[in-house]
Image (cartoon, rainbow, N blue to C red):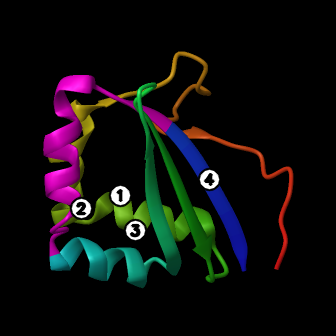
Amino acid sequence: MQRYGAVIGLKPEQIADYKRVHADVWPDVLAQIKASNITNYSIFLREPENLLFAYYEYTGTDHDADMAAMAADPITQQWWALCMPMQAPLDSRTEGEWWAATEEVFHLD
């Protein structure tokens, strides 16, 4: 099992809508997340900075392939088209990233 964390900004005028859509995530999106071997997935919001922090655990054997399968899923693409305009990617993110990857510096089981 591998752990992943990522950060992105959230546009202040979109906070209520972002919370609303995530209170009722589409079942097909949830199914794809599970099919991509993602468990224990959470998104946290830090206000007033309006930063989202996502955390998940990956239980598969090929993270890149599972993420590519998720990205190719038409329903997931529709979900991302809904959510991405609400987000504000960090200027410091690596080229090709939407959510900026984070480094785990401490963990306790």
Q: Is residue 63 left or right of residue 30?
A: right
Q: Are marks 1 and 3 in contact (CB under 8 Å)?
A: yes
Residue 5, numbered label = 4
Residue 69, numbered label = 3
Give the residue type at disc 1: Ala
Give the residue type at disc 4: Gly
Q: Is residue 80 left or right of residue 64?
A: left
**Residue where numbered disc 1 is placed:** 71
**Residue 96 visible to the viewer:** yes
For marks 4 and 3, the one nearer the N-term is: 4
Quadrant of the rendering where the N terminus is positioned:
bottom right
Quadrant of the rendering where the C terminus is positioned:
bottom right
For marks 2 and 1, the one nearer the N-term is: 1
**Which is in the foreground here, disc 2 or disc 1?**
2
Q: Which residues are magenta?
A: 8-26
Task: Give the answer, above or below, for where 57 lies relative to 21.
Answer: below
